[in-house]
Image (spheres, coloured by chain):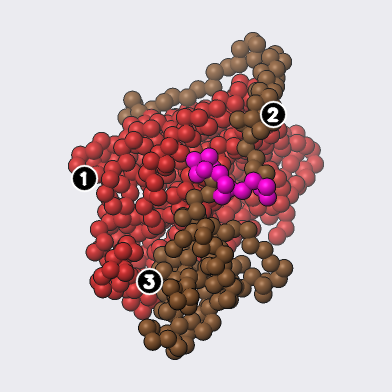
Chain colours: A red, B brown
Amino acid sequence: MPYTLKPSNAFDIDIETTEYLKDHVDTGDRWVLNFGPQHPATHTTLRLILELDGERVARCTPHIGYLHSGFEKLGEHLDYNQYVTIVSRMNYLSPIANDICWHHAVEKVFGVGLTPRCIVVRTIMAEIARIQDHLLCVGAAALDLGAITGFLYSFNPREKIYDICDFISGQRFHPDWTRVGGAMADLPDEEVFRRMVKDFIHNDLPHALKDLEGLVLRNKIFYDRTVGIGVMTREEAIGWSLSGPLARASGVRRDLRKDEPYLCYADNWDGQGAEAVQFKVPVAEAGDVYARFQVRIEEIRQAVGIIEQLIDRIPGGPMNVFTDSKTTKPPKSEVYGSIEGLIQHFELIMTNRGWEAPIAEGYGANETANGELGYYVVADGSPRAWRVKTRPPSFINYAVVSKMLEGHMLPDVVAVLGSINIVAAELDR
Amino acid sequence: MAIRDEDIVSIEAPPLNAMENLYIPEIVKGFGITLRHLATSWNKGKTTRALEYPEERRENIPVEKGGQYAPNFRGVHRLNRDAAGRVKCVACMMCPTICPANCIHITAADSPWDDREKYPKKFEIDELRCIFCGMCEEACPVDAIELTPEYDITGLSRQEMIFDKEKLLSIYDATIEKKPM
């Protein structure tokens, strides 16, 4: 593709036509810099065509598609349980949040309700995934600006999260843990799980946050390089349909956990009048890189608060919805012990028998660490979805890069990219 | 449902004070943090995270300290034997059906034994294709295929990493003590 490719007029931030760029940019000879797709600061395979005037970015054209892996098409070939192995590979910073979101959408279309135990454990894991994602993002934001130690300190507690995932599911990185109407297995040992999570939120995480904040938060070098960089106003953030920490750092009061509550964020989640978990939504007005950094750090603190409310109140009872439902596999004791269990077990797996999926379509979205992650599922009655459309937060957030970078210096490109936390596997799907 | 005012934490970036504006105090503070880490991680102190892998292994560490939980762990597969030492599998084709990666290949044949109709004449798992999701273990109606705590498998060629029935049964013999059935 030629480097001179121009974006459409809506994206055009040419210095000749954009009034306020005229002060910043000298009209010298422009040159084109190809940033990425293989570059350490792009984190994954992103490509930006930067048209530079001196060291100012006059125009930035993001190119996508370098990591396209056909994840959405695979959703048409794998059934509703199998596809969880693919969605956890989309946003690999917080795989379990993708699992939970995918089955949230499927259960919404199917009309399957969850057991209170499953709701609580899923909420805890969703918040742990949020911490996992934010820790990497705030660390990588520091790394991109030269503070490699901050990255290492924020990366350490993620090891504990992998251990928790390993414990409950058997695999550290890709838990593939949820199933329609429940989870792949009950917690192996509730007491150990509780101790591991408490150890993480009380011992490892506060130290890591303290170290990271001590290193970068009030550091003048970091401060100067992030304050006032990549500013999005509230109107722009709404206009570009940003979500998650990006929108909230620009003053948009939007959080799906409050606006369209699900799991334990909704009132009466257990059917017996249980109250929703208490937490606050951090909102900043500045809309710059520093505000996004602060919002993410505050969200980690709020996530710890949510986990603390729930970790001692994991209800008893089964993890999966009742076993005579048509969507969940019966426990192994049923399979070996009763003919009904064996028949249902076969019915769920064999391709020519299959599930009784409804003929319906619907959209289910969760507030994940990067923003609104949603799945649009079209079910045609067969065991496989007819079409699965993902609404990846990275894709929407990446569109705004050219807007954020206009008129900034070349070194600010990495600061802005680090603050958006783009995951190319999710972006290109 | 809009977010109420009392659910909002307002975040601002306060300007740096005079001390912070001087660069130097903050740099000293940052060095203090790294020096503290150096001191506390000295000689495998409490902030040490590294596991010296081939000598130290996760199997030998308690679960709460980051060890492996063997009953749950999704490592390399094995084919279980029954009490008479024969392969337990009845070639019902559930695992190749549920496998999201299509890595299990079974050729079924009439069983030479009286207690079942079919047995797997050929049973191959492509361990390079496998994503270790554990769905085969969930799907198996006779507990014949299982994932073991073994994770360090190696091979010099792709062909070598396609495990056949004998190899999978030998993994059973090697891991039955680590993970009893």
Secondary structure, mark 3, is loop
Q: Position of residue A221 (x, y in %)?
A: 68, 24
Q: Relative to A61, does residue B130 appear above or below in the rendering?
A: below
| Closer to viewer: mark 3 or mark 1 | 3
Q: In the rendered structure, which segment of residues is drawn in magenta?
A: B53-66
Determine if the magenta segment contains residue A242. no
Q: Is residue A160 left or right of residue A356?
A: right
Q: CA distance from mark 3 to mark 2?
A: 51 Å
Query: In the image, what residue type sits under mark 3?
Result: Pro
* Residue bearing the label numbered 3: B141
Secondary structure, mark 2, is loop
* Residue bearing the label numbered 1: A271
Q: Residue at x 59, y 43 (%)?
A: A401
Q: Position of residue A125 (x, y in %)?
A: 42, 44
* Residue bearing the label numbered 2: B42
Of the image marks 3 and 2, the number of the one nearer the N terminus: 2
Query: In the image, what residue type sits under mark 1?
Result: Gly
Q: Is residue B152 or residue A227 the one in the foreground?
A: B152
**On the rendered image, what quadrant is the N terminus of chain A found in?**
bottom right
Label 1 marks which chain's residue? A
